[in-house]
Amino acid sequence: MCLCSGVWEGMDDFPVYHGNISKHTCEDLLFKNGKTGSFLIRDSETIQGALCLCVYKKKVVYTYRILQTHNGYYTLQTSSGVEEKYFKTLQDMIRNYKRRDQGLATRLRYPVKREKLQEVDTTNNDPPDYEIVEEPSDYVEVLPS
């Protein structure tokens, strides 16, 4: 499986992708929706480069790890002995799991979409941990010892 950074390029355009949210935040979003079959995709907290498909069913959130093969196909990590299914796109995977009896706790029915793109907090009220030097004469030359 390809678990390289950058594997999930273009995910910001995928409305059910919530990015780097915690398991707890994910569960809060799904419980807030409260409908069996509600789902979203988030980054895995335990495996860098993997995603998680999180599905709500009767007050329980089921989490399935999404991996991408070296040839670009997507699959859900399965228990040993269970046949893996491969999909060309994440949309194909979701389309498949919207059907009944595909191996999930319940079929995917209600996408929980991001309310807005997650923004990086650029407001930092802490003073910088460096000194701003305005004149070149303020520099000190450091020589090796």
Image: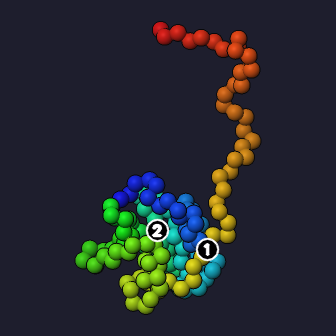
Q: Which residue is mark 1?
A: 113
At mark 1, the secondary structure is loop
Which badge, 1 or 2, is on the more N-terminal residue?
2
Who's the residue at 40% across and 54% down the image?
4
Residue 84 % position (x, y): 31, 76
User: What amino acid type should be assigned to the residue bearing mark 2?
Assistant: Cys
Residue 83 % position (x, y): 28, 78
User: What amino acid type should be assigned to the residue bearing mark 1?
Assistant: Lys
Who's the residue at 57% across and 63% down the image?
12
Who's the residue at 59% across and 85% down the image?
35
Q: Is residue 71 above or below residue 94?
A: above
Q: CA distance from mark 1 to mark 2?
A: 15 Å
Who's the residue at 44% across and 78% down the image?
92
Task: Write down the quadrant of residue 27 in the picture.
Answer: bottom right
**Residue 12 in sight from this viewpoint:** yes
Q: Is residue 46 above or below residue 78?
A: above
Q: Which residue is mark 2?
A: 52
Please name which of the two marks, 1 or 2, marks the residue nearer to the observer.
1
At mark 2, the secondary structure is strand
Pointer 2 local density, CA inside 10 Å: few below 14, some 14–19, many at least 20: many
